[in-house]
Image (cartoon, grey):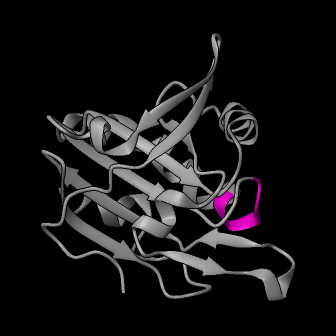
């Protein structure tokens, strides 16, 4: 069962890659004094994630900012190099923080880590989106396995 509304955002560190190299970032710190929209995908460069999930948030980034979202972020159980490259290929790096959850620690803390080993994919994050404000989860949209509906950018935007 995933965390509940009102729970604090897990204080787990993830990684990003920029011109200075790999940096460690606390997800909780990203929304301590502001509003964060974070969406999680099962994997970078995967079909639905690349064709619809990430592009939807890139296309609506200005609308999220207009609704008071300070940080728009994407996470996956991939390393920082993969997340940066995926962001670059999708023209996302200027609008979406690409957060690498390489060991699945954040997905595990969110109670949304899924076992995809039977399919040769290891441990992955479930597909979900969350709105957090002041360090607390205010909305959590978890898609059913294989679905892409409630974590889509238009659905999340409609709840701001």
User: Above or below — where is 158 with respect to 11?
Assistant: below
Counting labels gives 0
Quarter holding residue 80: top right
User: Above or below — where is 16 with respect to 151?
Assistant: above
- Which range is magenta? 45-49
Please name the residue shown 79% across and 82% down the image: 117
| Left or right: where 110 falls relative to 33 | right
**Residue 71 appears in the picture as rendered:** yes
Image quadrant in which the N terminus is located: bottom left
Residue 88 screen position, x and y as percent: 69, 30
Residue 139 screen position, x and y as percent: 22, 66
Please name the residue shown 60% across and 80% down the image: 114
Q: Is residue 136 magenta?
A: no
| Left or right: where 127 falls relative to 157 | right
7, 148: nearer the viewer: 7
Query: Residue lying furthest right in this view?
Result: 120
**Residue 128 appears in the picture as rendered:** no
Q: Is residue 47 magenta?
A: yes
Please name the residue shown 71% across and 44% down the image: 79
Please name the residue shown 83% across and 84% down the image: 119
What's the magenta bit mostly, secondary-structure-wise?
helix
Query: Residue lying furthest top in this view?
Result: 20
35, 30: nearer the viewer: 30
| Left or right: where 48 falls relative to 105 | right
Residue 32 screen position, x and y as percent: 19, 39
| Left or right: where 154 falls relative to 43 | left
């Amino acid at each position: 069962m995933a965390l509940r509304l009102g729970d604090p955002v897990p204080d787990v560190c993830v990684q990003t890659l920029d011109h200075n190299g790999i940096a460690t970032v606390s997800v909780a710190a990203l929304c301590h004094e502001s509003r964060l929209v974070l969406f999680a995908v099962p994997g970078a460069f995967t079909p639905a994630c690349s064709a619809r999930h990430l592009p939807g948030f890139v296309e609506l980034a200005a609308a999220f900012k207009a609704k008071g979202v300070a940080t728009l972020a994407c996470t996956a159980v991939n390393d920082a190099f993969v997340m940066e490259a995926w962001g670059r290929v999708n023209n996302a790096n200027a609008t979406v923080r690409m957060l690498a959850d390489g060991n699945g620690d954040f997905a595990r803390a969110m109670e949304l880590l899924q076992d995809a080993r039977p399919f040769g994919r290891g441990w992955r994050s479930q597909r979900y989106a969350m709105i957090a404000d002041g360090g607390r989860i205010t909305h959590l949209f978890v898609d059913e396995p294989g679905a892409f509906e409630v974590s889509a950018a238009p659905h999340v935007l409609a709840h701001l």
